[in-house]
Image (spheres, rainbow, N blue to C red):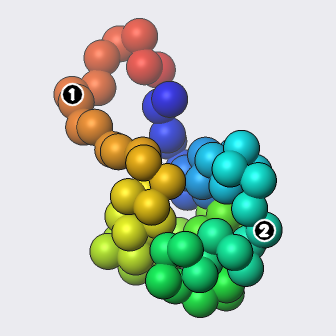
Amino acid sequence: TIIRIPGEFGDAIKEARKRAGLSQADAAAMCKLGTRFLSDLENGKSSVHLGKALQVLRAFGLVIALRKKTLSDE
C-alpha cells in the first residue's frame, strides 16, 4: 500500500484493527497506548507522535518500507 496522506495511514491502521476484531479501547490497551491516541491516528491527525505510531504498527505486525518514488507512483 502506498500512503500519501495521514488519513490513508489511519485507514490502514483502522483496517488492521477491525480485521483483528478489536475495539479501539482493546487495541489501544494491546498497544499500551491511550484510546485518544489511537483514535487520532485512525482519523489521520497529522501531528501524532511517530514513536507511538510505530508502536501501533509493531503491535499489529505491520512494517513501513521506504523506497524512492517512481513515475508510476504519481
**Considering depth in this image, is 12 or 68 the residue closer to the camera?**
12
What's the amino acid at mark 1?
A: Lys
Q: Is residue 68 above or below residue 14?
A: above
Left or right of residue 62, residue 22 in this image = right
Left or right of residue 59, residue 71 in this image = left
- Residue 40 image position (x, y, % from top left): 65, 76
Q: Quadrant of residue 69?
A: top left
- Residue 67 image position (x, y, % from top left): 22, 30
Secondary structure of the residue carrying tag 2 is loop
Contact between labelled residues 1 and 2, with CB atoms less than 8 Å apart: no
**Considering depth in this image, is 38 or 61 the residue closer to the camera?**
61
Q: CA distance from mark 2 to mark 1?
A: 35 Å
Left or right of residue 13, residue 73 in this image = left
Q: Earlier in the sequence, mark 2 or mark 1?
A: 2
**Considering depth in this image, is 9 or 18 the residue closer to the camera?**
18
What's the amino acid at mark 2?
A: Ser
Q: Residue at x 49, y 54 (%)?
A: 60
Q: Which mark is residue 68?
A: 1
Q: Which residue is mark 2?
A: 23
Mark 2 or 1: in front is 2
Q: Is residue 54 above or below residue 8?
A: below
- Residue 55 image position (x, y, % from top left): 38, 69
For residue 12, say whether it is visible. Answer: yes
